[in-house]
Image (tube, rainbow, N blue to C red):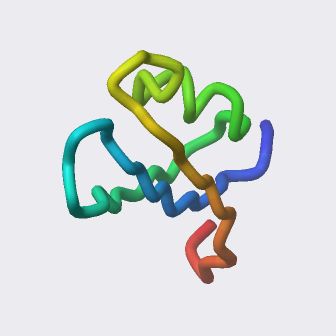
Amino acid sequence: MDKKRHYVVVIKETGKSGLLITEYIGFITPEKVAEFFGLGQSDVEWYEIEERASPDC
């Protein structure tokens, strides 16, 4: 079984002044996290995905 991973995702949506911050814990790659959250869509100006260490992961 793959290692469980904890990601923090920061998203800047086009036309919005603030940032959206969310988290994902699971067994997928950062590329799949981007796909899961739809980060390739035209309403996303930019995004960052950071993997965090977590004791339960």
Image coordinates of residue 51 in percent, x first then y, are: 68, 63
Residue closest to the far front: 15
Q: Which one is in front, 38 or 45?
A: 45
Query: Is 1 rendered above or below residue 42?
Result: below
The structure residue drawn at horizontal position 55% and vertical position 45%, both measured from the top left corner, is 26
The structure residue drawn at horizontal position 41% and vertical position 50%, both measured from the top left corner, is 11
Is 17 positioned to the left or the right of 36 in the image?
left
Q: Which one is in front, 30 or 26?
A: 30
Residue closest to the far bottom: 55
* Count of marks placed on residues: 0
The structure residue drawn at horizontal position 28% and vertical position 56%, both measured from the top left corner, is 20
Image coordinates of residue 55 in percent, x first then y, are: 61, 82
Residue 34, located in which quarter of the rendered image?
top right
Q: Which one is in front, 17 or 34?
A: 17
Query: Is 46 rendered above or below residue 49?
Result: above
Is 8 positioned to the left or the right of 49 in the image?
left
Residue closest to the far right: 2
The structure residue drawn at horizontal position 66% and vertical position 34%, both measured from the top left corner, is 28
Image coordinates of residue 35 in percent, x first then y, are: 54, 21
Is 24 positioned to the left or the right of 47 in the image?
left
Residue 21, located in which quarter of the rendered image?
bottom left
Query: Is 19 rendered above or below residue 56?
Result: above
Which part of the image, by quadrant, shows the N terminus? top right
Query: Is 23 rendered above or below residue 34?
Result: below
Q: Which one is in front, 50 or 12?
A: 12
Which part of the image, by quadrant, shows the C terminus? bottom right
